[in-house]
Amino acid sequence: MESVKVVVTGPFNAGKTTFIRTVSEITVLSTERKVSSASTPGEETTVAMDFGRITIDEDVVLYLFGTPGQERFSFMWETLSEGMLGFVILCNVTSSESVEEAANILGFFKGLSDVPFVVAANYSTGDENELADVRSRLGVPDGVRVVACNALQKDSVKNVLLGLLYAILERVEATG
């Protein structure tokens, strides 16, 4: 059985924890704590990581590592990225701030490792213009998948992960 380490990253409140919880076949290990800001009472944020697992078929298991989204916890990004074969950059398309921060996080991860990645446009309607705008704002080349996503829907999350898995397999075949 092949094990594939996948990092799910993106800005605060993009839906990373929800994304992993929606698809994980095990109880998700989560390190969420209440946000200390008065402007977001009752909201939680990941302070270390989320961990889940999904079996694609009897031969492939994806181990999902969710990063904290707040920059003050960015020291975990490098640690969690060690050994990853690919990553998902998740952004909330209803927030310009989320897309801008996703661009910064994407730059950080691309600097860490030259592995395949996909962009998951959470809350996207799937409109081609909307996805093209996300691609442009993140500076993502045409060969990288930018996929509409609803982190609350299992089939939508699976679609994102399968897109990443195909990109990983294409890379493996190309490098032979």
Image (cartoon, helix red, strand yellow):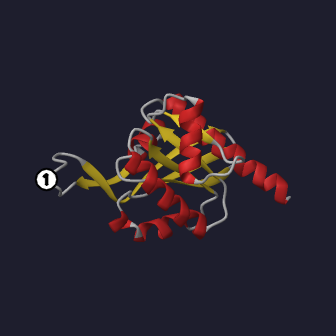
Q: Can you say whether 81 is above or below 142 in the image? A: below
Q: Amino acid at mark 1?
A: Ala
Residue 66 in view in this figure: no
Residue ranking furthest to the right: 176
Question: Image point 48% across, 69% down: which residue?
Answer: 79
* Nearer-the-camera pick, 157 or 21: 157
Hey, which quadrant is residue 74 in on the image?
Answer: bottom left
Q: Which residue is mark 1?
A: 38
- How many numbered marks, from 0 up? 1
Q: Is residue 132 left or right of residue 38?
A: right
The image quarter containing residue 155 is top right
Residue 103, x across and y down, in percent: 50, 56
- Side of 61 where 20 appears, left or right: left
Q: Secondary structure at mark 1?
A: loop
Q: Position of residue 87 (x, y in %)?
A: 57, 54
Please identify the quadrant where the C terminus is shown: bottom right
Residue 52 horizontal/vertical position (percent): 47, 48
Q: Tell me which residue sits at (59%, 54%) in the image.
A: 139
In the image, residue 43 above or below residue 158: below
Question: Is residue 18 visible in this depiction of the protein?
Answer: yes
Expressed as whole percent of the image width and height from the top left, the position of residue 112 reads: 58, 69
Q: Residues within 10 Å of mark 1 (few under 14, many from 20)?
A: few
* Residue at (67% x, 48% y) in the render: 144
Outermost residue on the left side: it is 38
Residue 59 or residue 166, whichever sits in front: 166
